[in-house]
């Protein structure tokens, strides 16, 4: 029986990233495309709880898919209405690289993959350091076979031990010297600023924006944007601080809380 391969994104149903992944996985199994009806960038792991979710089968440029008003993370659950089982979830190809913890935590592309991983589905997120659909389409001859290689590897061998999500970031350009490198996620990519403005009625409003920090060598930001290489970043969805039981200051905090409890019980 063919594997059911869920393809989703946060750029919406008209993004060429969906077709790139469809072409990549078509020889590997049964592609099922479900994507947001409008872009849902920076939606992270957000799910919809206070309004109805709708899903509709459509055709976009000859490609059969399902469109939804939900978020990328919603799609992981909506997929159960399209297929009885999802064997692997593929997210992307995102327009813009998803490098650094700062960006990863807000990315809808990685959010969908993480949501799949939380329920035990192998998940891979693909992103490219491009700014437009045209740039992504131009890079498709390179991205498609490389994405197929990664997906095929995971389908045959399973996720690497201790890894919940594989985040693959492609550079803006490819050359004969382009290589894939293991890269840890940088903590920050942007220095965030708030720009205050005034509308025609005198009311204040704000634009949040960021300026690039100088990336540290060896990080995903550096590998993709400085070296112009492919960053392979394994993500593990355990938010617990490592070896927290050995932190003396945390034990002191627990003692302080228990002392406070004892004072009013």
Image: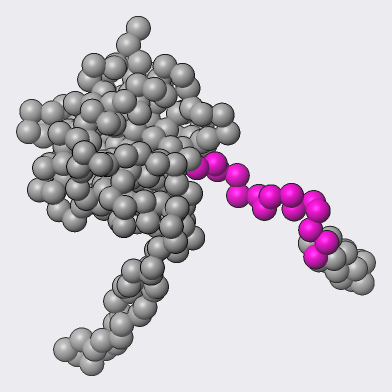
What residue is shown at x 19% (from left), y 48% (from top)? 173
Tell me the colour scheme of the image: one colour
| Residue sticking out furthest to the top | 1
Q: Which x, y percent locates residue 137?
A: 12, 42
Q: Which x, y percent locates residue 11?
A: 24, 48
How many badges with numbers are in the image?
A: 0
Q: In the figure, residue 205 lies in which quadrant? A: bottom left
What residue is shown at x 35% (from left), y 7% (from top)? 1
Q: Which x, y percent locates residue 34?
A: 27, 34
In this rendering, the answer to whether 183 lies above or below 210 is: above
In the rendered image, residue 57 lying in the magenta stretch gets the answer: no
In this rendering, the answer to whether 249 lies above or below 241 is: below
In this rendering, would 164 be left or right of 42? right
Q: Which x, y percent locates residue 114?
A: 46, 41
Highlighted magenta segment, given as a residue range? 235-249
In this rendering, the answer to whether 112 lies above or below 207 is: above
What residue is shown at x 22% (from left), y 20% (from top)? 26
In this rendering, would 243 be left or right of 180? right
Is residue 37 in view?
Answer: no
In the rendered image, residue 236 lying in the magenta stretch gets the answer: yes
What residue is shown at x 28% (from left), y 26% (from top)? 148
256 vs 145, nearest the viewer: 145
Is residue 250 in view?
Answer: yes
130 vs 72, nearest the viewer: 130
| Residue sticking out furthest to the bottom | 202
| Residue sticking out furthest to the front | 177
What is the magenta segment's predominant secondary structure? loop
Q: In the figure, residue 140 lies in which quadrant? A: top left
113 vs 86, nearest the viewer: 113
The quadrant in which the C terminus is found is bottom right
């Amino acid at each position: 029986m063919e594997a059911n391969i869920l393809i989703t994104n946060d750029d919406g149903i008209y993004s060429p990233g969906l077709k790139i992944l469809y072409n990549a996985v078509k020889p590997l199994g049964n592609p099922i495309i479900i994507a947001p009806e409008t872009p849902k960038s920076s939606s992270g792991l957000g799910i919809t709880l206070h309004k109805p979710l709708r899903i509709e089968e459509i055709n976009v440029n000859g490609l059969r898919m399902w469109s939804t008003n939900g978020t990328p993370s919603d799609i992981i659950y909506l997929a159960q209405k399209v297929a009885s089982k999802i064997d692997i979830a593929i997210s992307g190809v995102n327009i813009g690289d998803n490098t650094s913890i700062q960006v990863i935590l807000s990315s809808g592309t990685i959010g969908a993959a993480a949501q799949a991983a939380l329920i035990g589905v192998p998940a891979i997120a693909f992103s490219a350091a491009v700014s437009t659909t045209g740039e992504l389409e131009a890079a498709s001859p390179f991205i498609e076979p490389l994405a197929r290689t990664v997906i095929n590897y995971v389908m045959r061998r399973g996720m690497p031990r201790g890894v919940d999500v594989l985040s693959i970031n492609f550079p803006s350009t490819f050359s004969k010297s382009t290589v894939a490198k293991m890269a840890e996620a940088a903590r920050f990519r942007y220095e965030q600023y708030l720009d205050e403005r005034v509308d025609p009625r005198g009311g204040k409003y704000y634009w949040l924006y960021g300026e690039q920090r100088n990336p540290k060598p060896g990080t995903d930001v550096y590998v993709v944007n400085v070296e112009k290489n492919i960053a392979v970043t394994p993500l593990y969805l355990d938010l617990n601080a490592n070896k927290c039981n050995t932190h003396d200051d945390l034990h002191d905090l627990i003692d302080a809380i228990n002392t406070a409890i004892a004072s009013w019980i």
